[in-house]
Image: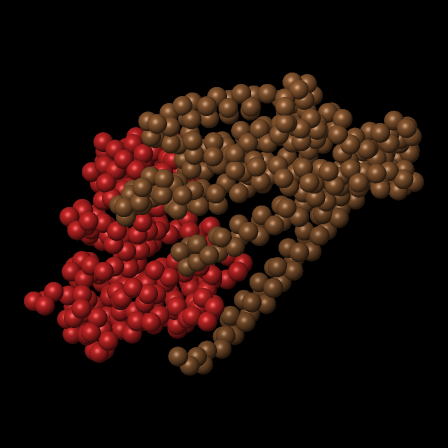
Chain colours: A brown, B red
Amino acid sequence: MTDAWSPSARELERRSLRRRQRLQRVVTATAVTVVVLGVAGWAVTLTPGWDRFQETFLSWEDAQESFPGIRHGFWLNVKLFLVCEVFILALGLAVALARQARSAWLAPLRVVAVIYTDVFRGVPTILLVLVMALGVPALNLQGLTTDPYIWAGVALVLSYGAYVAEVFRSGIDSIHPSQVNSASALGLSRAQAMRFVVVPQAVRRVVPPLLNDFVSLQKDTALVSVAGVFDAMFQARDYSSYHFNYTSYVVVGLFFIVLTVPLARFCDWLQRRWMERERAGAL
Amino acid sequence: MSLLEVEGLRKAYGEKVVLDDVDLRVDRRDVVCLIGSSGSGKSTLLRCLNLLEPIDDGVIRLDGQEISDPLVDPREVRKRIGMVFQAYNLFPHLSVLDNCTLAPRRVHGVPRRDAEARARDLLAQFGLGEHVDKHPDRLSGGQQQRVALVRALCTGPELLLLDEITAALDPELVGEVLTIVRGLAEADTTMVIATHEMSFARDVATTVCFLHEGRILEQGPPARILTDPQEERTRRFLSRVLPPSA
């Protein structure tokens, strides 16, 4: 179809009006942001202890001096996080599926899954890390590592696995039963319906809460420091007790922020792509 | 003055032009039926009329005021226009009554007591009196669509847009919904209706518009358009949708 359309005078007028409205919004947003942040920053510097605070928390020399050690320790946190995340996802999904299983043979598995989520969500993660990292090696089990780093990781997997299992379960429950019905009608078994129809949809739906848990996990890798693992947190504490300066804690904080923000942006992007594909034209 | 006037309306999704130079006038008490095959732009036209879709060109006026102006608040426009969708779109977490009183209470500021009284009244009138406190998913498709009609009517709209409201219903349930719409037409409700029900269009419409590839090819009183169309494409469309005897 050849299209000889060109916008009418009225449409051009409307476009320029819309442009002006957009510009106005951008200007307002920028002005408000600058003013609010400026006033907040200014107010902080007015507090009576600001000079002292600056010395103990924001000292540039201490930041530079503690940086290499923290960077070295932070690598442990990153490794721990990356490895744990894989196991947590697998464990969480497995537990969620076990709770959904309807076969009589799988009844014991269902009971274990329920007990597991109840117990491990109830126990404070720091307690779990201490018990696993210090307690399990004390059992003197043959052939098992006594490295507290490994066992602290196991504790994180068990703790977060329980949370993630519940996230997956609510995602699975939120998929309308008609989806299982239509899968059954096509002759798929219950397990196949789960695997090919329900779980893929559920996973997409729970990406935001999962991300939330993973950001939380990234931070909680710092808990391994209580078990004597030389991670970024331990390094920072070490530094601060030798130098009587807390700037190293601020440095650790920045490290964690730098790690979590890209993950959040990546998940936003992933979600938008899924949505665009599945809702195209449907609206 | 016409209640609704559309001039040179254009709507495109990227390269695809969905509505092209559409002109339409709807006077008060008119019932305008939009007919045409799927993808001819009927639904998009309705969605443009209450500003659910931004338009690419043309002018839409409601009561003489240009509502396609970016300075017009779309919510003020939608307060005056009711819409019913093909898939009912009731809110599943609210009871039938709450579905019907949400907009009157939250948008129009009607006190709860008055909003509920009016909703109960209309629901009873449409044979839904016993379902007031149920949740929509408990009802049949026909009942749900009648609730959706009541929900749209509860705010007392000046114009009602119906988007293929019987297309998702079993044939035996179509009648109960159309009876209500006929009643509304007899009560001089102004409506723009996208429909596939030709005999219904013949009965209630004051004007029938045939849409083809985003253009209104032909419009006029139903007697002329449905029995003696001038356009070849209208004739071909009608021969496909009308029973041979007609």
Task: Please tell me whether residue B118 is drawn above or below residue B166 in the rendered image.
Answer: above
Identify the residue at image location x=18%, y=65%: B241
Residue B16 sits above or below residue B70 on the image: below
The residue depicted at 74 percent of the width and 41 percent of the height is: A75
Left or right of residue B124, residue A277 in this image? right
Which sits in the foreground, B1 or A22?
A: A22
Residue A252 horizontal/vertical position (percent): 78, 37
The answer to whether one can see residue B191 in this image is no
Q: Toward the viewer: B218 or B246?
A: B246
Which of B169/A176 is in front? A176
- The single residue placed furthest to the left in the displayed view is B245
In this rendering, the answer to whether A36 lies above or below A2 is above
Q: Quadrant of the C terminus of chain B?
A: bottom left
Q: Position of residue A144 (x, y in %)?
A: 64, 27
Q: Is residue A11 found left or right of B155 in the rendered image?
A: right
Q: Is residue A221 left or right of residue A240?
A: left
Q: Is residue B73 left or right of residue B150?
A: right
Residue A74: quadrant of the picture: top right
> For the N terminus of chain B, which image quadrant?
bottom left
Asked whether B187 or B58 is in front, the reply is: B58
Residue B79: image location, x then y, percent = 41, 48
Residue at left 48%, top 52%?
A: A275
